[in-house]
Amino acid sequence: MGRLSRALIWIGKSLAVLVAIVVLNFCLIRLAPGDPATVLAGEAGASDPHVLAEIRQQYGLDRPLPEQLAIYLRAVVSLDLGFSYRNQRPVADMILERLPATLLLTGSAFLFALAIGIALGSAAARRVGRWVDSAISVAGLVFYAMPIFWIGLLFVLLFSVALGWLPPFGMRSMIPPEGAAARSLDVAAHLVLPALTLGLFYVAVYARLTRSSMLEVQHYDYIRTARAKGLPEGRIVRAHILRNALLPVITIAGIQAGQLVGGAIVVETVFAWPGIGRLAFDGLLQRDYNLLLGIFVICSVMVIFFNMLTDIALSIADPRIGAS
């Protein structure tokens, strides 16, 4: 099967998955308790049945559910994510305003977790049974078991309140410094704690996975052959053991890359980070259906995109995968 055929099949499957996700999310949102018309009427200071009926008619909430679904699917196909009931703004504009902050947070946390997790897992595998292996395993278990919001609060108390090293909340200072470099450093300082909080959980996952995978690979015949030929141990670890041990790590990392947005909801709430995770939380409280559905669509597209990158990375790490 040629690359073009595989690409077309992958695109077709991705579109089918995206349509199924949109339909499922639409139905689940409508089954959730609460009525956006009631929320809007309450904000306007009215709860009269006639006012509620007018609001439902204005936003199409009085139509049958299949008709609402058909209208929404046509809008999504035309790249229209709808209109926010609560904010009276296009959903796409609101998401595009918040998306860069979320990508900055999740991207930084992901790269941090992947780099540190692989390094710690490799160090533990090369020193298996020693105190370094035990310390890394215990630390990984601790950070894996602790809730993300609890880690964030502890970091705020330690590094912001007690030591005063880093800002506790937000993405920028109330009075931004002058100069592009100073503003970039200001954002970086605000990014440290939320990225560290979000990434530590995944550091533990990648460290444990890298360690177990390397311990399994190092007993293969080609590793013993490389040692018998007298190759340096460092080259054997880098070129043979680690490269082949990274295949399951890349697979899991690709799956979890899309899930980082879900974890970012908690982190963005704790640190008041202005991303789409916090926007989704506000939309849920306000029963803003279109806003929630728009965020779910964007998150689904991101997950599918990361799965594509995972397939590409696996084919680079092991060319036999791309040839199959």
Image: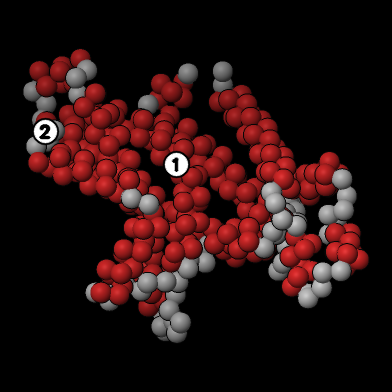
List x then y, in percent, for residue 79: 73, 51
Tell me the residue at 47%/68% (across/down). Answer: 272
List x then y, in percent, for residue 30: 73, 47
Of circles 1 and 2, which is in front?
A: 2
Q: Nearer the viewer, residue 273 or 257?
A: 273
| In this rendering, position of residue 90 left or right of residue 209 | right
- On the image, numbered disc 2 is attached to which residue? 129
List x then y, in percent, for residue 262: 51, 50
Quarter-wise, where is residue 3 in the image? top right
Disc nearer the start of the sequence (1/2): 2
Disc number placed over residue 15 in the picture, else none: none
Q: Is residue 139 visible?
A: yes
Amino acid type, residue under disc 2 in the picture: Gly
Quarter-wise, where is residue 74 in the image? top right
Tell me the residue at 43%/29% (across/down). Answer: 315
- On the image, numbered disc 1 is attached to which residue? 256
List x then y, in percent, for residue 138: 20, 43
Tell me the residue at 58%/59% (across/down). Answer: 281
Amino acid type, residue under disc 1 in the picture: Gln
| In this rendering, position of residue 261 left or right of residue 138 | right
What is the spatial separation of the Cα atoms under label 1 and label 2, in whole angstroms? 29 Å
Residue sitting farthest toward the front: 48
In the displayed structure, would residue 117 be above or below residue 250? below
In the displayed structure, would residue 144 be above or below residue 152? above
